[in-house]
Image (cartoon, grey):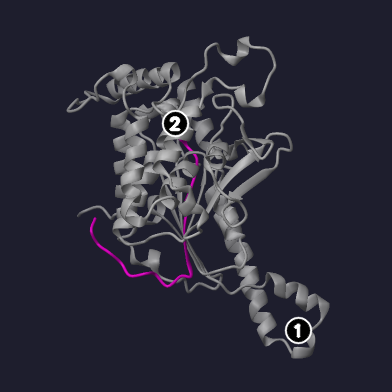
Amino acid sequence: MNTSVTRPPFERIALLLQGGGALGSYQAGVYQALAEANLHPDWVAGISIGAINSALIAGNPPETRVEKLRAFWETVTQPPLGLPVMKGFEFTSDMHHQVVNQIRSFATLMWGAPEFFKPRFPPPIFLPAGNPGNLAYYDVTPLKALLERLVDFDRINAREMRFSVGATNVRTGNFIYFDNDTHTIGPQHVMASGSLPPGFPAAEVDGEFYWDGGVVSNTPLQWVLDARPRADTLAFQIDLWSARGDLPRDMVEVDTRMKDIRYSSRTRAGTDQFRQIQALRRAMAKILADMPPELRQSPEAELVAKEADSKVYNIIHTIYHARKYEGSSKDYEFSRRTMEEHWESGYSDMTRTLEHPEVLQRPESPDGVFTFDLALQGRKEPQK
């Protein structure tokens, strides 16, 4: 896609990236389509693998972001044990494809992902109680070096773009966002957002230990929508798990469906709730504008004024829909071929989304909120 668009009429463009492990290359493909359309975000927020992709975007100039995303994903999907990348290989059926994917997933479990994570020997289950930072089946030390090589943290902290990553405080159970508005961001903050137990260890930040933000919420949508001061916002919400799906037919599909529901974090439901709240805020703003000055100065009116809001929001959902052959190991199947499939899916989905002009136009509905989901509103009519 080479179609460049002028800056849409919004004060803020936000890119929101859900967690999902190996599925994260889908988000890289989405970003490539946005970059080619000249839709560069002012704010990028992520959870887990979304935090890593966010750092690669915010920590590089626009002209090299896709290149750095590509470098990361090609690095972590190198075949284990120095084996060559399979090219030109064709699958004869979905079953054949599923078997190959399962073999590659098993290889990830055994040997990890290059320059990302590696198995701990001996496993922590055989060790006495110790530092929470060592209680995991994999060592993520290689990821720190990879982030430092591909991400300019000085650029993130220069706040050319707002940057937020979510994590869970292990001791308190509270959700926290490491945000360059309030924190000096380093690789430890990004790694904390992706420290999903028991695979990955808790990450230490300023004396506290953190797990993956997805333990509490896998989607940064609410953080951005609740931010103050409020601004007209065009938000691209890129999900890697679909809350909607078919009924499972076997035990593998039960596990897959459970993961989808758990990690989707109900972003559609969250959007519906936000729409209702925003309708009330806009109604309050209109009532206040028509209110006599003496009433506007009452304590009750001043309290209402703090919540009144006439801003508008476009929330564009792009959700990865896994193929049947991917199964419950889709989030740790780090093969090069599957990475390319995910990347191309993200690129294609965002390209088709941007073909709908209403996506980039200010909403005119009473609630001031427009939502778009390619799977629901962007289906092509069948050819007659």
Asked if residue 203 lies left or right of residue 62, the reply is right
The residue under the point 71% across, 75% down is 305
Q: Residues within 10 Å of mark 2 (few under 14, many from 20)?
A: some
Spot occupied by residue 341 in the image (x, y as percentages of width and height): 30, 37
Q: Which of the pair 233/371 is nearer the observer?
A: 233
The residue under the point 29% across, 48% down is 348
Question: Is 9 in the magenta?
Answer: yes
Spot occupied by residue 168 in the image (x, y as percentages of width and height): 64, 39
**Residue 312 can be seen, yes or no:** yes
The residue under the point 39% across, 50% down is 375
Q: Which residue is mark 2?
A: 331
Give the residue furthest to the left: 88
Question: Which disc number belongs to residue 241?
Answer: none
| Range covered by the magenta-colored residues | 1-21
Spot occupied by residue 13 in the image (x, y as percentages of width and height): 45, 62
Q: Which residue is mark 1?
A: 296
Work out how far the residue at label 1 is from the one at label 2, CA to CA, in angstroms: 53 Å
